[in-house]
Amino acid sequence: MRKVDTFAPHNDGHQWRKYGEKKINNCNFPRYYYRCTYKDNMNCPATQQIQQKDHSDPPLYQVTYYNEHSCNSAF
């Protein structure tokens, strides 16, 4: 597991597909769940959670990565 704070959570060089969203108690923003686009055809185990942290402009996000990519999907 690895956590990163960023203003651009989707620009990490990999392709992701959203598979869930959850409202978190005592938090103004939902948490989004993503998996690698190549999970099914290349058995890539990589997933990530994205949680917006504040109302700033641009907003700050905390991205939590689980597992490493085994698909070599980086640009």
Image (cartoon, helix red, strand yellow):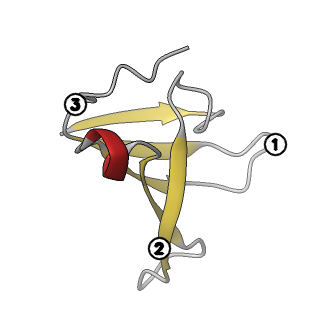
Q: CB under 8 Å between callouts 1 and 2?
A: no
How many numbered circles does the render carry? 3
Mark 3 closeness class: few <14, some 14–19, many ≥20 residues within 10 Å: few
According to the picture, the residue beneath numbered tag 1 turns out to be 57
Residue at the far right: name it.
57
According to the picture, the residue beneath numbered tag 3 turns out to be 68
Label 1 and label 2: CA atoms lie apart by: 25 Å
Which numbered disc, 1 or 2, marks the residue closer to the eye? 2
According to the picture, the residue beneath numbered tag 2 turns out to be 20
Q: Residue at x 35, y 45 (%)?
A: 41
Name the amino acid type tagged 3: Glu
Q: CB under 8 Å between callouts 1 and 3?
A: no
Residue 61 appears at what percent x and percent y? 55, 45
Residue 1 appears at what percent x and percent y? 18, 39
Name the amino acid type tagged 1: Asp
Q: Earlier in the sequence, mark 1 or mark 2?
A: 2
Q: Secondary structure at mark 1?
A: loop
Which numbered disc, 1 or 3, marks the residue closer to the eye? 3
